[in-house]
Amino acid sequence: MQKRSEGVRRIVFLFSILSAICWISWVAIATDGFHTFQANPVVWVGFAVQLFIAYFIPQLICKVAYWVIGGFRKDKAT
């Protein structure tokens, strides 16, 4: 698998941050400003786990894309 360029790394980082912000915003809107979270601390743990996942989804997509492109380049070289 080839090394990502600095530009791609920065774009992926930007999309990771935007993904996390979108997740926080969506949950805040859907729960009326997190008011339904106050009664159950387990919900906060679930929210944090899902926020962690939302942050790493763009990075996973990038790694898969580089893996697929690398496979095509390997086939072309042989």
Image (cartoon, grey):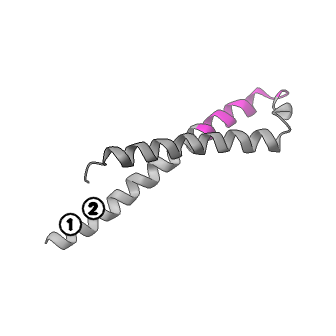
Tell me what residue is drawn at x 69 percent, y 38 percent. 24
Kind of residue indicated by mark 2: Gly
The answer to whether the residues at label 2 and label 1 have Cβ atoms under 8 Å apart is: yes
Q: Which of 46 and 24 is in front in this view?
A: 24
Asked if residue 72 lies left or right of residue 10, the reply is left
Asked if residue 39 is among those painted magenta in the image, a careful observer would answer yes
Kind of residue indicated by mark 1: Lys
Vertical placement of residue 76 versus 1, above or below: below
Vertical placement of residue 2 versus 25, above or below: below
Bin the neighbour count of mark 1 within 10 Å (Cα to Cα): few under 14, some 14-19, many 20 and up: few
Q: Main secondary structure of the magenta part?
A: helix
Considering the numbered disc 2 on the image, is that residue within a helix, a strand or a loop?
A: helix
Q: Quadrant of the C terminus?
A: bottom left
Residue range corresponding to the magenta coloring: 38-51
Asked if residue 76 lies left or right of residue 44, the reply is left
Vertical placement of residue 41 versus 61, above or below: above
Asked if residue 20 lies left or right of residue 34, the reply is left
Residue pointed to by mark 1: 74
Question: Mark number for residue 70?
Answer: 2
Asked if residue 54 is among those painted magenta in the image, a careful observer would answer no
Percent across and percent down for residue 2 are: 25, 53
